[in-house]
Image: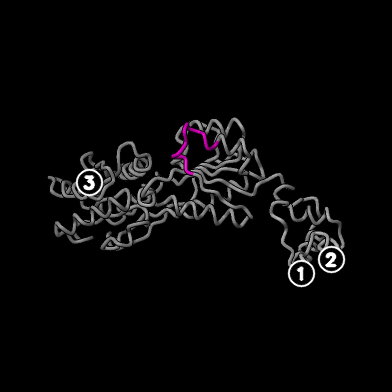
């Protein structure tokens, strides 16, 4: 015969309502009484009915992870899955489930967020930067719906968001290159419109300038972040009148192209040309020689996002707008 909440109450010597309050985390129950109830729950191996607990709490115990999921997304946006795993792991610790929702199939912008709020199908929303829109932002703020945005929205707002400090990552990269004696360094980035690439470049160029070593304009190259474009950019840089002694790659894919170009040109790394890349994942492990990396623990970023949404649920007035998860220098054999 299944153990009931009445059995737990009898074993603990308290009322059924007290057991219910302990299960639902009421702070009005004394620690001693709560401990006695928890002991009885463990001794009887009682499992609360999840639906009943959610009803009592007026909560679904579900958090939506909102993102954009296209074909080959794992290759185009590999960090998103690490972030997602971090979020899920942290939510699970607090008893929450997580539902993944793709915004690409929306008939109109904001449709998914509007539906979640209207149906109360989740207690809160974690929005990956790829799925953020002004429509989503307006809906969340108008309804004061618990949320956390992964990535700085880039516009003035009262949204809760966390991000990594890419400017600081650029500073770390520049400081390492300068400490190795590579004053003549080039930067190969993504498109001019890529915000992350822009921030990393600013960190690099600003730090070089402060140290008295300006990076020439011709040593700052923009690409479409493809391996082929990085390969061509590297060959052009190294055959110019003033070739760089080292190259900072804005991402792993660019680093693949740079390493291939150096190999084909017969350049010894790091004796003749050194290079550094951002992010360990997904390609640094297959680059030869193993590169020096400025890494961001994006799994930890997901953990921080999960923790923040739980805090937001406990304190609806909480406003979080901060950079989290510091960059880490991982020395390899390319510098």
Of residues 106 and 313, the one nearer the viewer is 106
Q: CA distance from mark 3 to mark 2?
A: 71 Å
Task: Let me know if residue 178 appears in the view.
Answer: no
Q: Nearer the viewer, mark 3 or mark 2?
A: 2
Q: Is residue 168 left or right of residue 42?
A: left
Give the mark toward the camera: 1 or 3. Answer: 1
Q: Is residue 44 left or right of residue 311?
A: right
Residue at the spot of label 1: 43
Q: Is residue 193 left or right of residue 48?
A: left
**Is residue 235 or residue 109 the one in the foreground?**
109
Residue bearing the label numbered 2: 11
Mark 1 lies on a secondary structure that is: helix
Q: Which residue has dot 3 on it?
A: 229
Position of 45 relative to 85 (above/below): below
Callout 3–callout 2 Cβ contact below 8 Å: no
Q: Position of residue 243 (x, y in %)?
A: 17, 48
Distance from label 1 to label 2 (Cα)? 9 Å
Asked if the residue at tag 2 contacts the one at tag 1, i.e. Cβ–Cβ closer than 8 Å, the answer is yes
Q: Residue at x 83, y 53 (%)?
A: 17
Q: Nearer the viewer, residue 9 or 255?
A: 9
Question: Under tag 3, what secondary structure?
Answer: helix
Which secondary structure class fits the magenta region best? Answer: loop
Give the magenta-colored segment's residue range.
102-113
**Residue 317 horizontal/vertical position (percent):** 64, 38
Is 110 one of the magenta-colored residues? yes
């Amino acid at each position: 015969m299944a153990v009931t909440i009445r059995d737990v109450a009898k074993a603990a010597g308290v009322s059924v309502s007290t057991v219910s309050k302990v299960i639902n985390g009421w702070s009005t129950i004394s620690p001693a009484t709560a401990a006695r109830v928890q002991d009885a729950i463990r001794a009887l191996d009682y499992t609360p009915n999840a639906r009943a607990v959610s009803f009592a709490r007026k909560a679904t115990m579900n958090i939506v992870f909102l993102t954009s999921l296209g074909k080959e997304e794992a290759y185009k946006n590999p960090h998103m899955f690490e972030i997602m795993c971090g979020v899920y792991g942290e939510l699970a610790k607090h008893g929450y489930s997580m539902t993944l929702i793709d915004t690409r199939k929306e008939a109109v912008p904001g449709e998914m967020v509007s539906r979640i709020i209207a149906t109360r199908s989740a207690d809160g929303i974690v929005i990956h930067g790829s799925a953020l829109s002004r429509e989503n932002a307006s809906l969340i703020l108008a309804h004061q719906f618990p949320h956390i945005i992964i990535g700085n929205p880039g516009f003035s707002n009262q949204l809760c968001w966390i991000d990594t400090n890419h400017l600081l990552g650029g500073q770390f990269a520049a400081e390492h290159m300068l400490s190795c004696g590579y004053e003549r360094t080039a930067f190969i980035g993504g498109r001019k419109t890529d915000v992350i690439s822009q921030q990393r470049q600013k960190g690099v160029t600003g730090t070089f300038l402060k140290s008295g070593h300006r990076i020439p304009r011709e040593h700052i190259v923009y690409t479409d972040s493809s391996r082929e474009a990085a390969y061509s950019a590297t060959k052009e840089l190294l055959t110019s009148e003033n070739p760089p002694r080292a190259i900072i790659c804005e991402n792993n894919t660019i680093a693949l192209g740079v390493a291939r170009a150096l190999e084909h040109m017969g350049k010894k790394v790091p004796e003749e040309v050194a290079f550094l890349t951002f992010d360990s994942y997904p390609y640094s492990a297959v680059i030869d020689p193993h590169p020096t990396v400025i890494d961001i623990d994006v799994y930890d970023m997901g953990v921080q996002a999960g923790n923040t949404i739980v805090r937001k649920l406990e304190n609806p007035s909480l406003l979080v707008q901060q950079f989290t998860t510091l960059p880490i220098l991982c020395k390899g054999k390319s510098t």
